[in-house]
Image (cartoon, helix red, strand yellow):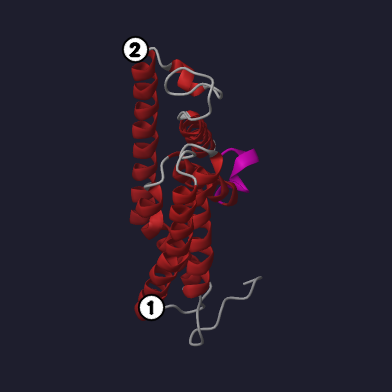
Amino acid sequence: ATLKACHIKAAWATVFWGSLHAVGELVYLASQGMLGLLWFGTSNDGSGSNEGDNLTFFFGGAVLLLLLALSVHAIKRRSSSVAATFRRNHRALAAILLLTASAHWWPFVIFLAPAVACAATGRAVDSMRHAGRSDAALALAAAMTATLAGIVPVWAARQAWKMAHPTQYYTLPLHMFPPAALGLAFTLAGRGGAPRGGAPPVPADG
């Protein structure tokens, strides 16, 4: 119950600050006559090149829309048409939101690394029939190690690509490295935190 309450508070705080950031960004761009940055084909200097922040703003707008969608989904969670699949759909939307947020701003990969490890640990613990504190601690340690193992090689590839293409900092490939890092990190963390002997896994129908 306490964890759920913290999740709800953190989620609504994210909606508030994310919306405030988006509105503030729009106000700033409008005040500077830079709303053209929101459209593809317009660069920072107003020319027609593709060297601007267009994709950054595109993914930012997508994050805002996903936040609003998650908000509506949460508000409607007790509706008969939503309740049956709420958890599964809410998790899917949240995962898409986090991946999109990392494409919008790459430092989210660093900030989300603990969340990736904790999510993988939660899945690992849920798969155990009788998980104790030591099992959870070992699963978390393994998941954290696996998370770093997933992020580091992708980040090395990102750096190599950036050095090889110094004039393409704002292009789509560079925006795709952060979500790829999180995806690989979660996959490896899920495997790293999975039970190895000890408590048997819960059957699929159990």
* Mark 1 surroundings within 10 Å by alpha-carbon count, few (fewer than 14), some (14 through 19), many (20 or more): some
Camera-side residue of 2 and 118: 118
Q: In the image, is residue 41 above or below residue 108?
A: above
The reply to whether residue 1 is visible in this rendering is: no
Camera-side residue of 26 and 125: 26
The CA span between labels 2 and 1 is 52 Å
Residue drawn at 35 percent across, 51 percent down: 111
Q: Residue 27 carries which label?
A: none
Which residue is identified by label 2? 31
Which residue is identified by label 1? 138
Q: What element carries label 1?
A: helix
Q: Position of residue 127 (x, y in %)?
A: 53, 73
Camera-near label (2 vs 1) is: 2
Residue drawn at 35 percent across, 27 percent down: 20
Q: Assess whether residue 56 is covered by the magenta stretch.
A: no
Q: In the image, is residue 108 above or below residue 155?
A: above
- Type of the residue with mark 1: Leu
Camera-side residue of 85 and 54: 54
Q: In the image, is residue 99 above or below residue 126?
A: above
Q: Assess whether residue 84 is covered by the magenta stretch.
A: yes
